[in-house]
Image (spheres, rainbow, N blue to C red):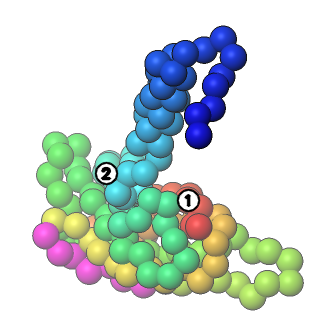
Amino acid sequence: MEIEVPGAGGKEVMKRAMAFLAAYCLLLGPASADKLELKKKAGEYEVGISIDRNPPVVGDNTLEVKITDAAGNPLENAKVLVNYYMPPMPRMAPMNYKEQAKFKKGRYVLEMSLIMAGPWIIILKITAGEKTTTAKFNFDAH
């Protein structure tokens, strides 16, 4: 069975379909990155986080925290307390978790278990020697 499109030849329809497909792939490409990566300045440090899924999902997600000084050197031997929580909602029990991240291969790593889709907040409390600084990140889980 052949479908005819008034005013357009088969080649023209194919060109339009290919143009649409190419535009769709370009738009979809950046949205399907392997990891969610966010960065910000916290005191004298550059703090970057990556979550192994983009977008993060309900269930287990691996959080990696990279902390560097002004020269770009990784911060080692720090204590990184990760507080991740969902903002309070009426008639809902608090979803607030605190854990120490472990230092592995130049990064601080933690397994987060997100129990619900929606907005989440991560607050990192970074203590190196006598200095403590914090960094706050927001993301949505799906």
Question: Which residue was labeled with disc 1?
Answer: 139
Q: Nearer the viewer, mark 1 or mark 2?
A: 1
Taking the magenta stretch, the answer to whether it contains residue 8 is no
How far from the left and from the top, in percent, is residue 127?
A: 33, 70
Residue under the point 20% across and 61% down? 75
Spatial CA span between label 1 and label 2: 21 Å
Q: Residue furthest top?
A: 7
Left or right of residue 72, residue 54 in this image: right
Count neighbours of disc 2 (C-alpha within 10 A) and say few if under 14, some if 14 to 19, many if 20 or more. Answer: many
Which portion, as a residue range, is magenta? Answer: 99-105
Secondary structure at badge 1 equals: strand
Q: How many marks?
A: 2
Q: Residue furthest front?
A: 1
Identify the residue shown where x is 58% and y is 34%.
Answer: 2
Left or right, 40 with respect to 141, comes to: left
Question: In the image, is residue 135 above or below residue 22?
Answer: below
Quadrant hosting residue 117: bottom right
The C terminus sits in image quarter: bottom right
Q: Amino acid at mark 2?
A: Tyr
Q: Which residue is mark 2?
A: 45
**In the rendered view, does 130 fall on the left or right side of 117?**
left
Residue positioned 32% across, 64% down in the render: 65
